[in-house]
Image (cartoon, helix red, strand yellow):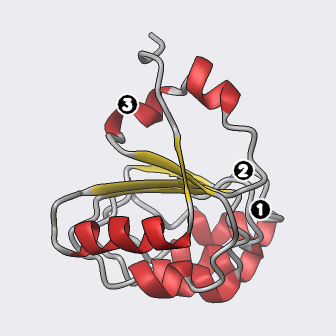
Amino acid sequence: MPTSQKTIQQINASQLDEILRKVAGKKHTNLALFGPEIDVQSYEKNPPDYLENFKCIYQLLSWDANLCEKIRHFNNLTSLLLIGNRIGVDQAKQIAKMTNLVVLILSGNQIGDDGAKYIAGLANLKMLSLRQNQITEIGVKHLAALKN
């Protein structure tokens, strides 16, 4: 059953920093950040079921090359959505340090097979989406080790 309509708030760099301060203060257990090139209207009108878990959903107005560096120590997060944020191998390695993640949505990034190897170390994952990430059979083999 589809979730209710969601509102995705567009934010600039200073607003992102304020939101991340709240997350760091353990006021949130989930974080959803769409990249600036993502057409979020379809997500707002007909949100996928996995968005139901996300209370605060944002779209960045500009890229933040240090995004994963900023959030990698947020062990309070159990759900993370970073669609279309130019996340590559190095950023996947940082995300892999967030060991309490249960839901991880990283569609539309550049993780590749090497990044998939790091993501495969997140033992608590119950839901994972890595669509459109240049992952081949090699990366899939790494991810097949996930038990949940």
Q: Residue shown at 72%/50% (left/top)? A: 131
Does residue 87 sit above or below 72 in this rendering?
Answer: above
The answer to whether residue 55 of the structure is visible from this angle is yes
Q: Amino acid at mark 3?
A: Glu
Q: Secondary structure at mark 2?
A: loop
Q: Secondary structure at mark 3?
A: helix
Q: Callout 3: few (<14), some (14-19), or many (20+) C-alpha neighbours within 10 Å?
A: few
* Position of residue 114 in the picture relative to residue 129 (left or right): right
Is disc 2 in contact with disc 1, using a CB cutoff of under 8 Å? yes
The answer to whether residue 103 of the structure is visible from this angle is no
Q: Point out residue 51 in the picture as x, y percentages from the top left corner.
A: 45, 35
Q: Amino acid at mark 2?
A: Arg
Numbered tag placed on residue 52 in the rendering: 3
Does residue 80 sit above or below 126 in this rendering?
Answer: below
Q: Tell me how far mark 2 sits from mark 1, CA to CA.
A: 6 Å
Q: Residue shown at 43%/18% (left/top)? A: 3
First-in-chain label (2 vs 3): 3
What residue sits right under mark 2 in the picture? Answer: 131
* Position of residue 77 in the picture relative to residue 130 (left or right): left
The total number of labels drawn is 3
Q: Tell me how far mark 1 sits from mark 3, CA to CA.
A: 23 Å
Q: Amino acid at mark 1?
A: Asn
What residue sits right under mark 1 in the picture? Answer: 133
* Quadrant for the N terminus in the image: top left
